[in-house]
Amino acid sequence: MKIKGAIIFSIASIFSHLSHAQQSPVEACHIEGIKAKVQCGSLTVPQDYAQKDGETLEINFAVLPAIDNSQYNEPLMFLAGGPGQAAAELSPMINRVFYDIRKTRDIILVDQRGTGRSSPLACLENIELDPYILIPENLTTTEIQQCLDALPSDLSHYTSENAIRDFDAVRAALGHEKVHIYGGSYGTRAALVYMRLFPESLQTVTLDSVGPVEVPIGLFGQSASRSFDLLLKHCKEDAACNNAFPNLRGDFDAVVAALKESPIEVTIPHPTLGTPTRFVISKSRLISTVRLQLYSTRGRYMVPLIISQAAQGNYLPLAGLVAQSAEGLGMYVGLTFNIVCSEDLPRVTEQMKTTDADNTFGQDDSHSAFNVACSVWPKYQVDEAFYEPVTANIPTLILSGNLDPVTPPSNGDFPAKTLPNNKHIVLEHASHTVAMSTCASDLVAQFVKEQDPKALDESCLALIEKPSFMTSLNSDL
């Protein structure tokens, strides 16, 4: 299921690992949100790389051609997040963020198998939210089974490693000996797998908001609580915020207690249709909505006011955020569950869940939905080598946002300890996928050009201001 909008030589040269692949022509195409024509294509790959003469899949990709028509610089391949985002669908955003790179290099965006137009794992429209903001009371095993019934019977080949084999096949089919790769959020996990499987194909690697193989996806309780505690601290340090909300922690705890006792029903105009829409706001809905706002400094800007208004009995601003979050983050939830339920949740112990739930923000809400889904989702076997630290000697830039609620800076320390040629930069006043919203995108462009992570000019980072907060309903957004 795609959740609608709230983190990829000649064909003969690829036969060493993809004898069944077929090169498809790249054709001029138009992508909404980009004025000039770009290039689109697809590649036929084995569904199972161990049986290259068996069933096949079509892998969709887009190429944003270099503005200067350069054919000699290695391109940048973008690895989308999730798991479950389709890279080609993010083309307008990537074109904007990495436009400086595109001036002299192609940018390649591959829809990971199971997303976009690459054999999408599209469930029925019965699961309405992004898996990262799903709440337990909105998800049942019956709905998960209905989702599974709409998918192919064998999902065991929709894996992170097979996705990377697809990406490298596209690289080869487009005639590139090497590529630079940028991965954000889950895309960093994919990038690390790429480094382990095909290090010879990579010129540089940028890991933005790291989801290392050592840290299971889904345990976000502690990291979300850390991010929320930073928000409370920053509000206390901000004179305007502290004057407007002198007891923000107490207000939050009071709202949580009230919603836990009795959810609130609020009717507001639908954000896109304009029709009156009823929203039930529970404790879990509050937590998931606030956690989503913590992904960006713009979202954090509104949180104190939203909490304060709810504490005073005005849930309309919170309902507005709930309505916005219902648009989701553009995820194909079938792939999300397929990967997390096999590659992550099986290695999460009860002690790990207990430790993650021991926090003062959302307790166990972050992994409850995955517990429900994975109780019925079929599993595939993951090789133990998948979880081994990556040690490839490839120039690597690691970026972390100090305010990140899901991939905290400590995540970036894992690859920083094992990769021999890296630099880990923590942006003090940034949150998730920092290149998408700060001058870190300039650092990525500089790094791709110079290929030395330790020689970057980081001076622009000092200009990133500490985020402020919205203190009244009449404030500018």
Image (spheres, rainbow, N blue to C red):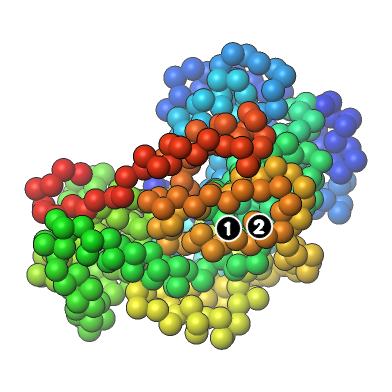
Q: Is residue 424 above or below residue 226?
A: above
Number of numbered discs: 2
Question: Which mark, by number, is residue 363?
Answer: none
Residues at discs 1 and 2 in contact (Cβ within 8 Å): yes
Q: Is residue 318 above or below residue 41?
A: below
* Displayed quadrant of residue 19: top right
Which amino acid is tagged 1?
A: Gly
- Residue closer to the observer: 390 or 236: 236
Outermost residue to the top: 68
**Residue at the location (50% across, 84% down)?**
354
Which residue is under mark 1? 412
Percent across and percent down for residue 265 are 18, 69
Which amino acid is tagged 2?
A: Pro
Percent across and percent down for residue 260 are 26, 81
Percent across and percent down for residue 110 are 63, 38
* Residue 332 seen in this snapshot: no
Specify the quadrant that holds the C terminus: top left
Question: Which mark, by number, is residue 415?
Answer: 2
* Displayed quadrant of residue 244: bottom left
- The secondary structure type at the circle numbered 1 is helix
**Residue at the location (90% across, 40% down)?**
16
